[in-house]
Image (spheres, rainbow, N blue to C red):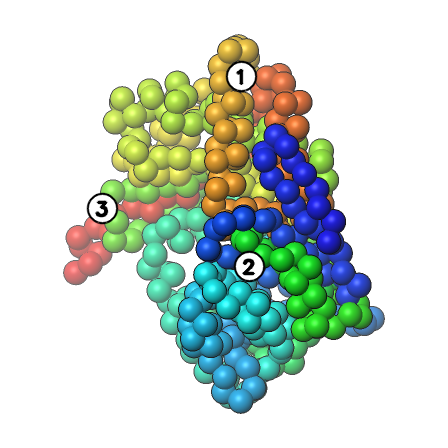
Amino acid sequence: MNPTDYPELDETVYLDRLSNGLTVAVVPRTGFSKKLAYFVTDFGSIHLDFTLDGAEYHVPAGVAHFLEHKMFDLPGDRDVSAEFAALGAMVNAFTSYDLTAYYFSCTEHFDQCLRLLLEFVSTPYFTEESVQKEQGIIDQEIGMNLDAPDTVVFENLMEALYRTHKVRLPILGTSETIREITPEVLNACHRAFYTPGNMMLCVVGDVDPAAVARAALEILGPQPRPVGKKLPMEAEAMTAGQPLVTASLEVAMPMFSLAFKAQPLDSGDEAIRRELVADLAAEALFGESSALYLHLYEEGIIDSSFGGGFETIDGCAMLMCSGDSDEPEAVREAVIARAGELVREGIPEEAFLRLKRSALGRRIRSLDSFDATCFRICAYHFSKFDYFRFPELYRSIQAEELRCFLAQVVRAEAASLSIIYPVKKEEIL
């Protein structure tokens, strides 16, 4: 494997693309007992339409999450979690809108754990009986989410903000869509996207990079396999589909999530640079040290739950903030008004440099986290960017770019506001 040094970060990364198409990254942590491995596929809940081997597929919402659950089944009634536990390791997985990750951490038996990770994620085993059983389990999870305010406020926001993008659909799917999932559907998705050319293996710890690559070739095989091609999504107008959506749940006070639709990012250096510009603009607009945050906090309109940032998902992007407030619509108006002031007046150079130093420092400190490092290396790899090059992008950003971003994105017609109100007593009775 080929090492690349990053002196500014005091990091070295061993990176290689194996003969089977899998990209492998190893970040050495000499002397640490903990070892962490992420095995990630560029396949998430929004990827419902694709082609493979000349055939076109349109699969039900929730299939990526369903597949994540079913990957823990192996022939012979093997219990993957129990096998990891017997090795002293913790294993888990998650599905997001645009990727699915499987990971474990351990202090010993690393090679055995790595081979078990590669084995179970690459072994499709779906029976009619187990799929039907899983439908019941996931249906219960969906039901619990319907009563979870954090989930409801965000999913309602996505449905309001976007008209056609699949981000409108819950990651778990719905009670109706998961009933359409069959072993044949799961096998098609696995063949399309759980193939080395669509995946990345990232390891952080005191391990031998060559041994990691060798295990991947031995378990997954040396030959490349076809990768499914995601069908393009319909372009969205840069206006919100619905300005306001409300619901009632058992919360102590109203909670809200506010988003401004932004142009989706592509991939590569320029796209990631735009993402960093947007992150800095969010910090300037409503970060904890911003004038807006301090004003709203002192007025009692927000509390310490308030926060925000820039979110990107394959095919969409948004500037967001959320929290608890008795006056969520006042927060929306204040955010729009403050953005207008920053656009007219600009951001003072001293304040801008302070923002940039703070953001860069947070990114560097996050490298101390094995999980954050693994996840970001994989996520940025799928965006065709070497994550450890982020310092050079920060250095190139100018204050004027933040002003331009706010002018383009923070517009009333691009905003959706999702509010969860407390259930009234008469509604409970």
Name the residue: 35% across, 38% down: 323
The residues bearing labels 3 and 2 have C-alpha atoms spaced at a distance of 40 Å
Q: Which circle's residue, 3 or 2, is located before the other in the chain?
A: 2
**Disc 1, SS:** helix
Question: Which residue sits furthest front?
Answer: 31
Which residue, given by chain and number where applicable, does mark 2 sit on?
37
Would you identify the image quadrant in which residue 228 lies? bottom right
Q: Nearer the viewer, mark 3 or mark 2?
A: 2
Q: Inspect the image, locate mark 2, and give the three-letter code of the amino acid beneath it.
A: Ala
x and y percent of residue 85 in the render?
A: 42, 72
Question: Which residue sits furthest right?
Answer: 54
**Disc 2, SS:** strand
Above or below — where is 65 with respect to 306? below
Q: Nearer the viewer, mark 2 or mark 1?
A: 2
x and y percent of residue 12 in the render?
A: 64, 42
The residue nearer to you, when weighing 429 against 200, is 200
The residues bearing labels 3 and 1 have C-alpha atoms spaced at a distance of 39 Å
Q: Inspect the image, locate mark 1, and give the three-letter code of the amino acid beneath it.
A: Leu
Left or right of 14 on screen, residue 407: left
Name the residue: 37% across, 61% down: 146
Which residue, given by chain and number where applicable, does mark 3 sit on?
252
Q: Inspect the image, locate mark 3, and give the three-letter code of the amino acid beneath it.
A: Ala
Crowding at dot 2, Cα within 10 Å, few <14 / some 14-19 / many 20+, comes out as many
- Position of the C terminus by quadrant: bottom left
The residue nearer to you, when weighing 427 against 295, is 295
Q: Nearer the viewer, mark 3 or mark 1?
A: 1
The residues bearing labels 2 and 1 have C-alpha atoms spaced at a distance of 36 Å
Is residue 344 in sight in this rendering?
no
The residue nearer to you, when weighing 124 against 35, is 35
Crowding at dot 3, Cα within 10 Å, few <14 / some 14-19 / many 20+, comes out as few
Q: Which circle's residue, 3 or 1, is located before the other in the chain?
A: 3
